[in-house]
Image (cartoon, rainbow, N blue to C red):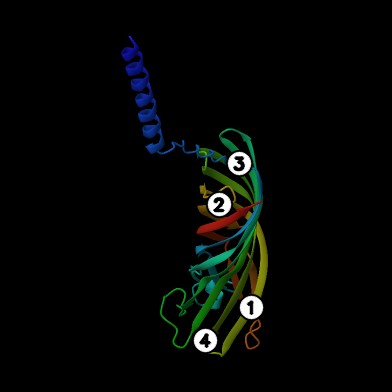
Amino acid sequence: MKRLLIGMVSATALAGGAGMAIAADMAPYYRAPVPAPVFYSWTGFYVGGNAGGAWSSNNALWTPLPSSSAFGVFPIAGDTGGSSAIGGFQAGYNWQFAPTWVAGIEGDWSWANTGSSINQQWATNPAAVAVPGSSTSMSSTLDWVSSLRARLGYLVLPNLMAYGTAGGAWGKVDYAASNSGGVVPYATSTAFSSTQGGWVAGGGLEWMITPNWLLRGEYLYYSLNSSPSVVAASPTAPGFPSGYSWSNTNVSVARAALSYKF
């Protein structure tokens, strides 16, 4: 009996020692912390810059006065629109008023140099024969454009918004025109600038890269509702002035913009 008790005590001690040795050899186990979810809030003020391309159209018309038949040549018309780079800045405020809807207001200003000129020879009325040494030139150039717009967006993803936008627009356009020719020396010219108002509409996609940085691509269509016209007199032929006129200036803009949200 005594031998049995001694054996049982020895076995228990050996088992306890082996368990302690195994526990000592095992490395401690740590559970990795769960990453905190990213919360995207579109509400807040933002400022940023933009760059892209602009394409304009503007129809110019030279009208020989007092009438085409009395002057003896046909009118001349053409498009003085063109294309150029465009760039500027924007600032605005977004309000996320529902889980997937965002409303806002934005103002922007962009520099441009968009336009071209036409240069055509006169043609006699009614025979349509070219008048040697004659020409009429007309041009228009968009210097800058700005807008104040409302925006309404839908969150396709928590950090990706599709939106539409519309509002008022303003722009500065430079105009110039001149002509010369005829049997009697004839010449007129004019040059002026005009700041015009109108409207703008468009849309795009905006990506919230981080809770503070926004990147977008958008298209905007501007219509500046002004149709300037000038009557220019010729010192050598006072009874036969020239009428110069231009249509509304329409501008398509495709651009990217980066903004910082406060």
Name the foreground residue: 110 vs 232.
110
Spot occupied by residue 68 in the image (x, y as percentages of width and height): 54, 72
CA separation, marks 1 and 2? 42 Å
Q: Is residue 66 visible?
A: no
Q: Which of marks 1 and 2 is nearer the N terminus?
A: 1
Q: Which mark is residue 41?
A: 3
Name the foreground residue: 143 vs 161.
161
Spot occupied by residue 24 in the image (x, y as percentages of width and height): 41, 36
Quadrant position of residue 143: bottom right
- Residue 14, relative to residue 29: is it above or below? above
Residue placed under numbered mark 1 in the picture = 191
Residue placed under numbered mark 4 in the picture = 181
Q: Residue 131 carries which label?
A: none
CA separation, marks 3 and 1? 50 Å
Name the foreground residue: 83 vs 127.
83
Q: In which quarter of the image is the N terminus?
A: top left
Label 3 secondary element: loop
